[in-house]
Amino acid sequence: MLIGQVIGTVVATRKHELLSGSSIQIVQLYSPESNTFTGKAIVALDVVGAGEGETVVVVTGSSARIAMDRENVPVDAAIVGIVDQLNVEPIKG
């Protein structure tokens, strides 16, 4: 699982029929090294109704297809949760 922040929405007038009615979001990933949302951005199908600026949980690979509850859906990243609070302890080295 990954943590990220929704930074935008993808509008697609044409998409695979199994994605019809689904929202597609752009998610900037959380970087634990810097404790900020400065990681790379990915595109993820939103199955929980997240909005821009919200911190979310993203799954990838077969877990994303399972989240869609469809085995043959062409998805490799899905937003499956909205984070209420994120507590990160600094790494001690």
Image (spheres, rainbow, N blue to C red):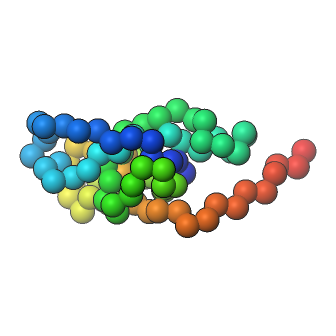
Relative image position of residue 49 (x, y in whole percent): 33, 61
Provide residue 33's location: percent of width, then percent of height.
Answer: 72, 40
Front in this rendered view, residue 33 or 72: 33
State whether residue 2 appears in this view. no
Residue at 45% of width from left, 47% of height from top? 6
Residue that protrudes farthest toward the top in the picture? 40
Relative placement, left or right, of 33 versus 51 is: right
In the rendered view of the protein, which quadrant contains the C terminus? top right
Question: Which of the 4 image quarters holds residue 34?
Answer: top right
Which residue appears at 70% of the width and 61% of the height?
87
Left or right: 72 as drawn, with respect to 45: left
Judge whether 56 appears above or below 38 on screen. below
Residue 4 x/y as whole percent? 52, 48
- What residue lies at 31% left-to-right and 49% top-to-bottom? 45
Q: Which residue corresponds to the image point at 78% horizontal and 57% vertical from the top-left?
A: 89
Relative depth, front residue between 91 and 8: 8
Rendered view: 13 above or below 86: above
Q: Is residue 89 visible?
A: yes
Residue 91 located left or right of residue 16: right
Horizontal relation, residue 25 to residue 81: left or right: left
Q: Is residue 86 above or below residue 61?
A: below
Give whichever of 16, 66 is nearer the camera. 16
